[in-house]
Image (cartoon, rainbow, N blue to C red):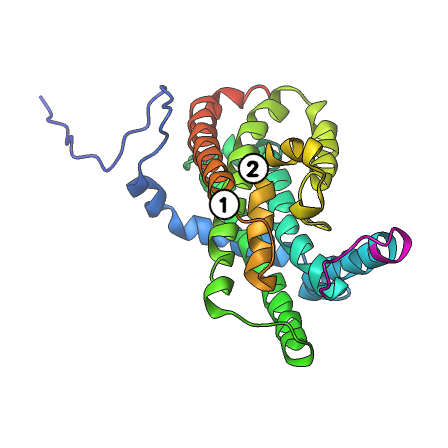
Amino acid sequence: MLQRDQNWDWEITSETSWLGGSLKEIFHYKDLLFRLVRKDFLASFQQTLLGPLWVILQPLLTVLTYIFVFRNLMNLSTEGFPSFLYYLIGITLWNLFSELFLNISYTFMQNMPVYSKVYFPRIIAPLASVLLYLLRFGIQLVFLLVVYFYFVATTDLQFDFFKILLIFPAILLTTGLGFGLGLIFSIFSTKYKDLLGLLQLITRLLMFVCPIFYSLSMVPEKVKWMVNINPLASVFELFRYSFLGKGQIEAFPIIYSFVITVLLVMGGMMLFNKMGDKLMDVA
């Protein structure tokens, strides 16, 4: 009787797990992860006029629109700071969240042809989206830093090295919120197609309860609780504070955002791992 070798690296079964594949298995597919990032990054700029410059042109055009609408027409205060820099700070971080959230929400729809033919840990696809949009964000962040240091050199804006380091926890929390929410909505948007239009609407509405073109100090006290429910609010305030050194930075809202981020990432990954393979026949 033949003896089978039981020293498997991993075993594929019909059962799904809340925890999904092990870190070892995900690490084994690291080459696939980086190839997906490279493919999507290059594909997004193929047959385009400006190529990667669109990554910078997008926030630039948005900021110019904000200046015309909120500054010139509505005369909304930028707290004494240059309006171009003030709006650019907010829209740069918003692009990271919105693009990450929407793209991951469409994970199954975009990757179903591959999911149904080839086995690999399903979480690889949304992880590739995280790396892709962090790469795009990195380009926009470099542009933001160039603009920031220009105003430091030409105005009385003060540079503080330790404050600027606060951009990293803000980026981490924003990425976690976009990733966790995207994973959760990827399950429901696959089962209920009409949610796809709703996602666009939610994203647009969410923009107005994030301090992108205003500060939390400008929000009336009687409605401030509505803004503070949004875990992104304190994160955007922290990101702006790291550049400008002004804003309402309190411990409790930051802790609240951190806890919500951890819960969304853990819950999103567990739901994604448990339900992912069951949606193959639904999408």
Label 2 vs 1, first from the N-terminus: 1
Residue at 28% across / 30% down in the picture? 11
Q: Are marks 2 and 1 in contact (CB under 8 Å)?
A: yes
Q: Left or right: 163 with respect to 5? A: right
Question: Between 9 and 230, which is closer to the camera in this rendering?
Answer: 230
Is residue 79 on the magenta stretch?
Answer: yes
The amino acid on which the numbered mark 1 sits, given as a three-letter code, is Leu
Residue at 41% across / 37% down in the picture? 120
Q: Residue furthest right?
A: 73
**Helix, strand or loop status at disc 2:** helix
Q: Which residue is mark 1?
A: 173
Q: Which disc number belongs to residue 231? A: 2
Magenta residues span 71-81
The amino acid on which the numbered mark 2 sits, given as a three-letter code, is Pro
In the rendered image, residue 61, in percent from the top left (x then y), is placed at 79, 59
Give the label, 2 or 1, closer to the camera. 2
Mark 2 to mark 1: distance in Å?
Answer: 9 Å
Q: Left or right: 58 with respect to 279? A: right
